[in-house]
Amino acid sequence: MTDYWVLIFFNLLFTSAPPVIYGVLEKDVSAETLMQLPELYQSGQKSEAYMPLTFWITLLDAFYQSLVCFFVPYFTYQGSDIDIFTFGNPLNTAALFIILLHLVIESKSLTWIHLLVIIGSILSYFFFALAFGAMCVTCNPPSNPYWIMQEHMLDPVFYLVCILTICVALLPRFTYRVLQGSLFPSPILRAKHFDRLTPEERTEALKKWRRTGKMKEVTSKYADQSAAISGRRPTSDPPVTFSMKSATSCAVEQGNISIYETAVDRGYTETEASEMTGLSKH
């Protein structure tokens, strides 16, 4: 369906640079956020990005995209008199855009370098296809790519097939990422939001993050201790909710959560926080 020179340059030139740039420049969150929230490194330590479920989902998604790349042009040109190499041209074009836009969907830190490389890949593909189709009349018999791209670029059906194929192929991946970021964001996705905040908003967000994490940690600790003493696991019943609140209060009284730090986080001055700490000790 495609001349072998197009296949060679497809992997060697048109789609090789974007994944390399993606691997070199990609970062989840900024270095400043990682320094302030070192617990985000737990995602890499636990290999959460390389779980078997992620592998199988990616494999099924790739299989789905390959089916879309073939069958959308197939049903579009079914019954027409186009040759097999003319049929393969929209497949290659759609596959190129799917690969590049898939990287855009997965990328968390797009820069002008990413855009430059992606645009360069697209332009190099069309430049080669047009030049090869204009010069190669019977370069590789029985392949005859002569003037195929030129004719397709004047045909509205070609653009319609490519756009439809790209949208249908990337729709599941795009929908999944949108739902993940909106309904069940990971700690890394929530931390990435800090990079878009002003310095004042960032400081308040970090305080809230630490306070929430600390309260959860202490509450879980004392709830487990209460459950061990009573001989049962904590449930969502009202008495357990009360015991969890009591555990948090106990943690504050025992100094596991600094009253001084809590007061400062809530906006009190250092003098007022010190006075509150002194009163609590008495």
Image (cartoon, grey):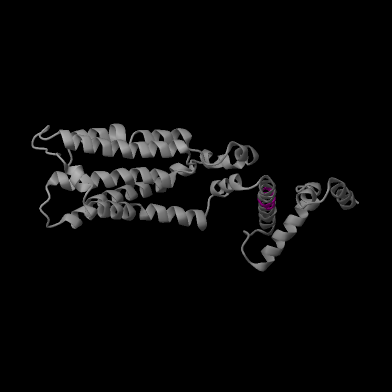
Q: Residue at x 8, y 34 (%)?
A: 141
Front-lying residue, 217 or 118: 118
* Residue 63 appears left or right of 178: left
Residue 217 in sight from this viewpoint: no
- As drawn, the residue found furthest toward the bottom would be 238
Front-lying residue, 178 or 257: 178
Quadrant housing residue 195: top right
Q: In the image, is residue 60 part of the stretch drawn in magenta?
A: no
* Residue 270 appears left or right of 193: right
Q: Residue at x 53, y 42 (%)?
A: 43
Span highlighted in magenta in the image:
210-215
| Residue 154 in the image, given as x and y percentages of width and height | 22, 49
Please determine whether, in this image, residue 239 is positioned above or below residue 158: below
| Residue 114 in the image, given as x and y percentages of width and height | 43, 38
| Residue 149 in the image, given as x and y percentages of width and height | 20, 43
Magenta span: chief secondary structure: helix
| Residue 83 in the image, given as x and y percentages of width and height | 11, 47
Residue 231 in sight from this viewpoint: yes
Please determine whether, in this image, residue 194 is positioned above or below residue 21: below
Please determine whether, in this image, residue 169 is positioned above or below residue 113: below
Front-lying residue, 274 or 17: 17
Q: Residue at x 74, y 59 (%)?
A: 246
Q: Which quadrant is the N terminus positioned in?
A: top left
* Residue 152 appears left or right of 249: left
